[in-house]
């Protein structure tokens, strides 16, 4: 039974790693095609389109209920939610700051999602950072994607 659980967990981790690899590749393609200088929404739309072309479900402006002690506190809107597992926070700024990193970390804490990618298209080359939820919370208890 423990071996089965380990195999399932390894499969989920491999799936998340593959999803993030595809998202980063899509981001690089968008960055190379569009360059810097557009507003955030342009990159968000292009990235969601490119992720979809790669065969993954990418929901833009995906509302997610956030709860605390089994009470729904409100709704957070993810720039892009990929395969219901990876939050993508899109920026188009000259530089990323610690506040943007804390934003991703707090999204992971609040939602229980496994990974958040912070992607900045505001520079000549794409900047990205990957944040992992190490708190051990599982998304189904903490996150309820709103239809």
Image: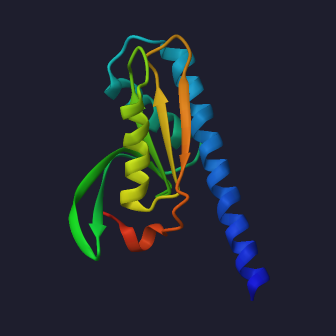
Which quadrant of the rendered structure holds the N terminus?
A: bottom right
Colouring convention used in this rendered image of the protein:
rainbow
Q: Up-down: is 27 above or below 111? A: above
x 61%, y 48%: residue: 19
Q: Quadrant of the C terminus?
A: bottom left
- The reply, left or right, for residue 105 in relation to residue 133 is left
The answer to whether residue 147 shows anywhere in this view is: no
Q: Is residue 100 above or below residue 126?
A: below
Q: How many numbered marks, from 0 up?
A: 0
Which residue lies most toward the front here? 98
Q: Position of residue 69 (x, y in %)?
A: 29, 75
Q: Is residue 143 visible?
A: yes
The residue drawn where x is 58% and y is 24% is 29
> In screen coordinates, is 70 left or right of 49?
left
Task: Find residue 40 and report its horizontal and vertical position in percent.
Answer: 34, 25
Tell me where residue 23 sits by quadrant.
Answer: top right
Expressed as whole percent of the image width and height from the top left, the position of residue 67 reads: 28, 67
């Amino acid at each position: 039974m423990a071996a089965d659980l380990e195999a399932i967990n390894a499969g989920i981790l491999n799936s998340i790693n593959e999803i993030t690899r595809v998202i980063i590749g899509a981001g690089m393609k968008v960055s190379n095609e569009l360059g810097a200088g557009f507003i955030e929404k342009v990159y968000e739309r292009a990235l969601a389109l490119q992720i979809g072309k790669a065969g993954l479900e990418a929901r833009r402006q995906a509302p997610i209920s956030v709860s605390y002690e089994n009470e729904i506190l409100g709704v957070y809107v993810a720039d892009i939610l990929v395969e219901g597992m990876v939050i993508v926070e899109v920026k188009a700024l000259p530089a990323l700051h610690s506040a943007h990193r804390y934003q991703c970390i707090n999204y992971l804490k609040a939602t229980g999602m496994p990974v958040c990618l912070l992607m900045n298209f505001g520079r000549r080359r794409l900047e990205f950072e990957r944040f992992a939820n190490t708190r051990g919370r599982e998304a189904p208890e903490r996150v309820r994607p709103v239809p």
